[in-house]
Image: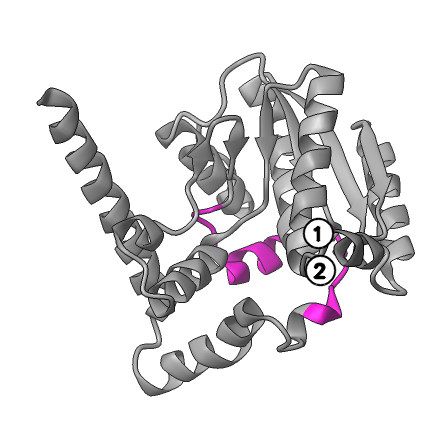
Amino acid sequence: MKMRKENDLQQKVLTTIQKHNLIQEGDKIVIGVSGGPDSMCLLNCLFCLKEILKIELVVCHINHMLREEAEEETEYVQAFCETIGVPCFTKYADVTKMSQEQKLGTEEMGRKVRYGFFEEVAKQTGANKIATAHNSNDNAETVLMNLLRGSGISGLKGIEIKVKQYIRPILECDRIEIETYCTEKELSPRIDKTNLENDYTRNKIRNQLIPYLQKEFNPNIIQGLNRLSELATEEEEYFKEIVSRT
């Protein structure tokens, strides 16, 4: 089904869903929504495609209590969900305190809390899929990060588009497309300023290494890394198939 030109990103997401068989009619999907551009793009896309795909949606939002703006972001997500009529489940988690108690980094602790809550809400609501808002830039960063760590082929696959009940419908969209979509749809997503800080390896890769590589070596490094990811995925699947025949 072809959509109007202004909805090209929605068409791209629909194509990704169909190509990778991410969603089936009757699915109930939990969407992880922080309030940032990626997750608001994902939520709005799936909401606009809801009737075409014949699906139900539920939103999960976690307030990590790490920043002053967090409460305003929570209110923004809740208000947006109320406007479009999608149930929103919210969890407050003192990630700093929890990370100290469990002797984990705040980033790792935050991820543990998020995915635990996603699965808790899925079970509570009878949802069979969980959608997260990873995009092609995230994938490129993951591939590069794994490459720097000396990863094998498995690590070069990057972020998988479908793992068990988890799906990533905007994984083939890049950050510029997503931000443009948010502007066109007047979504007014919230910006997490900590993404601009270089305290974590991923942020250093995103804010320092990739811009340097784009400027000095290859302006299309994001696309190149995503192609490497595709090739690594294809190779691993091929070898698995060969092994299964023996």
Quadrant assignment for the N terminus: top left
Numbered marks: total: 2
- Vertical placement of residue 6 versus 90, above or below: below
- Residue 43: x and y in percent read 67, 39
Magenta range: 171-194
Label 2, on which residue?
106
Question: Which secondary structure lies at badge 2?
Answer: helix
The answer to whether residue 178 is magenta is yes
- Mark 1 is surrounded, within 10 Å at the Cα level, by few (under 14), some (14 to 19) or many (20 or more) other residues, namely many
Label 1, on which residue?
110
Q: Can I make out residue 149 in this image?
A: yes
Amino acid at the residue labelled 2:
Thr
Amino acid at the residue labelled 1:
Gly
- Vertical placement of residue 213 versus 113, above or below: below
* Residue positioned 38% across, 31% down in the render: 20
- Residue 230: x and y in percent read 28, 48
- Residue 32: x and y in percent read 68, 40
Could you say which quadrant of the image residue 92 lies in?
top right
- Residue 68: x and y in percent read 90, 65
- Residue 148's disc number: none
Q: Are marks 1 and 2 in contact (CB under 8 Å)?
A: yes
* Residue positioned 74% across, 26% down in the render: 121
Q: Is residue 155 left or right of residue 192?
A: left
